[in-house]
Image (cartoon, rainbow, N blue to C red):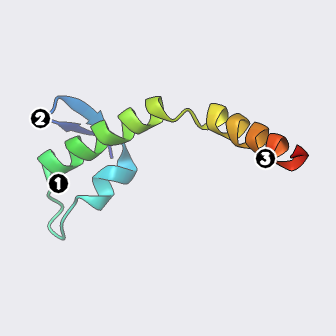
Amino acid sequence: MSYFSQFYGVEVRDSIVKEFTNSRGEVDDMMAGLHEIRVRKAEKEYDLRDLARKVKMARLAGGRS
């Protein structure tokens, strides 16, 4: 189920579309688009591999003290 937010002009992933779809199958365009943008921003801001590396290094450094 691919969805394009008309309000924000972004392609919204299926998992987000499901969260903002009502019982009649209607998608809340603004909420779905906004959530997609926020998730994309978080993904860029918090590169999970980089974060895992930083956590591991912090644990190693803390263990030596």
Query: Which residue, given by chain and number where applicable, does mark 3 sit on?
Result: 59
Question: Which callout, 3 or 2, points at the residue further toward the start of the chain?
Answer: 2
Q: Residue furthest bottom?
A: 23
Give left or right: position of 23 versus 2: left
Q: Is residue 36 above or below residue 23?
A: above
What's the amino acid at mark 1? Answer: Val
Q: CA distance from mark 1 to mark 2?
A: 11 Å
Of tags 3 and 2, the one toward the viewer is 3
For residue 33, what is the image quadrant? top left
| Residue 6 image label | 2
Residue 15 location, x and y as percent?
39, 52
Residue, x 22% and y 48% (percent of image)?
Answer: 32
Q: Residues within 10 Å of mark 1 (few under 14, many from 20)?
A: some
Element carrying mark 1: loop
Q: Are dots 1 and 2 in contact, CB under 8 Å?
A: no
Q: Residue furthest right?
A: 64
Residue 25 location, x and y as percent?
18, 61
Residue, x 14% and y 47% (percent of image)?
Answer: 29
Element carrying mark 2: loop
Query: Which residue, given by chain and number where applicable, does mark 1 sit on?
Result: 27
What's the amino acid at mark 2? Answer: Gln
Residue, x 37% and y 41% (percent of image)?
Answer: 39
Q: Nearer the viewer, residue 7 or 14?
A: 7
